[in-house]
Image (tube, rainbow, N blue to C red):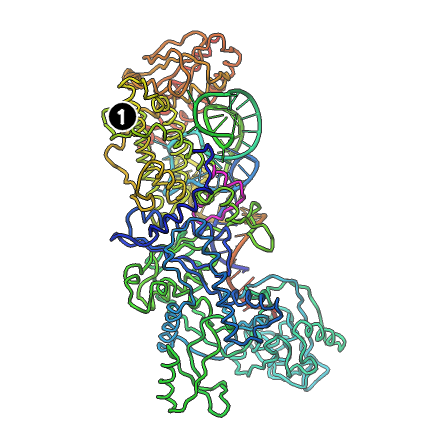
Amino acid sequence: MDSRYSPQDIEEKWYRTWQDAGAFKPQGQGKPFTIVIPPPNVTGALHMGHALNNTLQDVLTRFKRLQGHRTLWQPGTDHAGIATQSVVEKQLAKEGVKRQDLGRGKFVEKVWEWKNEYGDRIVNQLMRLGSSCDWSRLRFTMDEGLSKAVREVFVRLYEDGLIYRGTRLINWCPKLQTALADEEVENKETKGHFWSIKYPLADDPASFITVSTTRPETMFGDVAVAVNAEDGRYKHLIGKQVRIPGLDRTIPVIADEHADPTKGTGAVKITPAHDFNDYEVGKRHDLKPIIAMNLDATLNHQAGKYQGMNRFDARKAVVADLEAAGLLAAVEDRVIPIPTCYRSGDVVEPYLLDQWFVEMKPLAVPALDAVEQGRTRFVPGRYAKTYRDWLEPFKDWCISRQLWWGHQIPAWYVVSETDGKRRQDTPFVVARTAEEARIAAVGKYGANAALVQEEDVLDTWFSSALWPFSTLGWPDKTPELATHYPTDVLVTDRGIIYFWVARMIFSGLKFLGKEPFHTVYIHGTILDEKGQRMSKSKGNGIDPIEMIGKYGADAVRFALMILTTEGQDIKLSPVKFETGRNFANKLWNAVRFVLPHLEGNREPLRAGDLQLADRWILARLDETIKTVTESLEPPALRFSEAAQALYRFTWDDFCSSYLEIRKKVITTDAAGASPEALAAKRQAVSVFATVLEKLITLLHPFMPFITEEIRQALGKPELLITSRWPEAGDPGAGDAEAAATMELLLKIVDSVRSIRGDYTIPASQATDLIISCDTAALQARLKPHADVISSLEKVGVLKVELNAKKPAFSAPGLFPGGHIYLPLEGILDPVQEKARLTKELGKAESFAAAQEKKLSNESFVKSAPAEVVEGERTKLRSQKDRVEKLKAALADLG
RNA sequence: GGGCGUUUAGCUCAGUUGGUUUAGAGCAUCUGCUUUACACGCAGAGGGUCGGGGGUUCAAGUCCCUCAACGCCCACCA
């Protein structure tokens, strides 16, 4: 074995072994534990957010698998409508081909080709990370099975009256030429202008009403000017007609609460077809909306001479013309939130269009209850509010998209036979298949009804919403569905609580009657070292695959886990992975060291033969098992705590203390050793192996590769991944008293080291040591185990005494229950020693003073719990004792 | 304009229900060390009074109020 652990050599080997062994498949008859992966986009490449997200899921999956649950981590990818369509369009563009040139059928074929060729990239990257998904169950949202689920859901929602088609003001992305849901629109603060425009009165063209707007180019869709009924400036104008500048059309001045006298001029133009507020105003006043724009965001025939101009050019032209005509009253610079498309970045246009919607209220109410009543819980809990705030307004969900890549809406229009075209009011049927649709249409509209399927596809999130059950075979009643639904924990980031989490919850409730998971774990966001989001455009991303190559997957995983404290964002830089790499290396070397002594020496532990250090490490192991198990158990999910407990135990207790103490015994040369020495070696080695076996099991969820490799090195034929999680409280777990004695001895060692360090005494130079105990009981307790100290420090004569007298030229140190003396004749420097002791004394005195003050406070003694007061008294006593000893030592120095 | 989060050693962060440490860890710094697993190592050391202010309490980093800075999310571009 090499002194450097090289992950590259073993990761691929073990991953293949696990796969071949079917280790990722649900096994046994234990209580099921299920996680569904947040399906990454097929177009995606693994980024640090994925690495974190999937490591968390894998830690849980491996933990539960080891605990004996029938564990399934269900993998899959998302067809990601817009993203995937764009990728393929860009590829075609390189060949000078547009999707329209190909036509829908051919284009969709191309996308499938692309998916089949490149869609596995992210899956392979997840494997590099060590993800133990059941890949035999890999799903894709456009698979036949999942598409069937989509159609089923659509039909049922339609039949329940929860899906409807209607003309509403929706968000339109002119670049992508599709409708968007509200959540797909991002408001971006942008520098803009606030213009005040004079609209002449129809019956008195010399008088004006001045309206304020940030969007003058929409004036051709104006249907009114609104003022507030309370606004004295405009009361007399209500009911009058005004003329839209540059047009021959007049519109009324109306009174509406939407007009805010404090904003702008207090008069506002009303453009129902292009503004959400105005749409509501228009409805209140029964004003017919006028569409003034084409779908490509150029102005239409309503705009007179501006017809054909795009919206931004038109804005400039309109403003220039208004100014020339003396109708521009004011221009103000202003920062405006501009709605933009989350995919294309284009400015979104509110547009009046015919679309498909899901009525939210009947679905949202039970979903809100599920969280309110704790059947589904968010970790951290504050995200329940985020969830509620989004669902509660019950805003209907626009689900139709004018794309080609996606689930085509299962609605068929019954078109006229003459031209085969559909119109606004063409009747339609909704059905699971074309055949069903035909039967329904014939029944309803006669034998010769001709059908044309709706061209729109569904919002990608419509299919993602079904993920926890569509992947398990729903709507069929599969065994997987029966076993693994509801799932247990959903691990995701806060960015998709609306898009995905909420929709899965109401879908699960609606179609299966149960919440899809009991816990939603929301992890933090990965940021760069400056605290900025990682992004392609900033170029500040850290590539997880590159990090895995450099530090190993185990190191990357472990580092991420130690950084994952509840819900906090993570500032990341490559050096953070060194922690993980160094840790793996530490463990590796401990094993490498003991391994040669293990062979043929392994034997059962015999309680009577266990040394103090053995009993202590077994007790510490037991505590660690408890901590790690409790930390990982949902809903605690304290990943960092678990990882740190393992780090501490492995590095400090197991390596720095235990192994150092037992080193000599473990390395005893078997040849020529006495039978006693050999017996001692065998026990020491066996304790080490016992602890190590459990330790690597505890570590396995975090560092699956190295632990599996170690397991093999220990000569175990079975795979670690499917072995058993250790239980706390095993017999032979070591005992608390031994552990306490050991802790005292370690404190004495600390004290010795501190003094030796102060005098920079080389490790190779021995010093004598006198341990002075305050009580005979303590003396009796420590004396038999003094060898622990000499195994950690080079000690000459070692005495454990009762109230020993301070030898001349010795340096004193303290530990709970006594003190030590380090005779340092020839080394002790009175000046340095005086400084050292004075400093210690100062600390002890100020602490004692603080205790005294506290205890002299009557209300403290009266109000505080007796045990707290007693604790303080004990502290004070020992501190006073300490002060005295230090004073004596100082006096001794002269 | 609302809501939420963060602010603890030079840096990155822990610190559960207020009282066991005299506020911890890793990295960095300083001093030693070829101690027969590991320099991706070993042993020491220095360094914070917990963003500011006020309050509750016998007792506050830990609860309340307030201010500030940074960040995130939401909000109809009159």
Give the quadrant of the N terminus of chain A.
top left
Seen at 28% across and 48% down, the residue is A68
> What's drawn in magenta, residue-wise?
A563-581
Instruction: Return the residue nearer the eye: A94 or A227.
Output: A94
Q: Relative to A346, say whether A704 is above or below.
A: above
Mark 1, secondary structure of its residue: loop
The question of residue A315 being in magenta is answered with no
A267 left or right, relative to A884: right
Location of residue A450 by image quarter: bottom left
Q: Relative to A579, say whether A311 is above or below.
A: below
Residue wearing tag 1: A610
- The answer to whether residue A280 is seen in the rendering is no
The chain letter under disc 1 is A
A531 left or right, relative to A478: right
Seen at 54% across and 48% down, the residue is A542
Q: Relative to A221, say whether A646 is above or below.
A: above
Q: From the top left corner, tell me how far across and down residue A211 is, in percent.
A: 65, 74
Instruction: Return the residue nearer the eye: B16 or A553.
Output: A553
Seen at 51% across and 17% down, the residue is A760
A518 left or right, relative to A809: left
Instruction: Return the residue nearer the eye: A525 or A393.
Output: A525
Q: How many marks?
A: 1
Q: From the top left corner, tell me how far across and down residue A784 is, in percent.
A: 29, 17
Seen at 25% across and 32% down, the residue is A732
Label 1 packing within 10 angstroms: few (<14), some (14-19), many (20+): some
Location of residue A686 by image quarter: top left
* Residue type marked 1: Leu
Q: Residue furthest front?
A: A671
Q: From the top left corner, tell me how far across and down residue A709 is, in percent.
A: 38, 40
Q: From the top left corner, tell me how far across and down residue A98 is, in percent.
A: 59, 72
Instruction: Return the residue nearer the eye: A698 or A499.
Output: A698
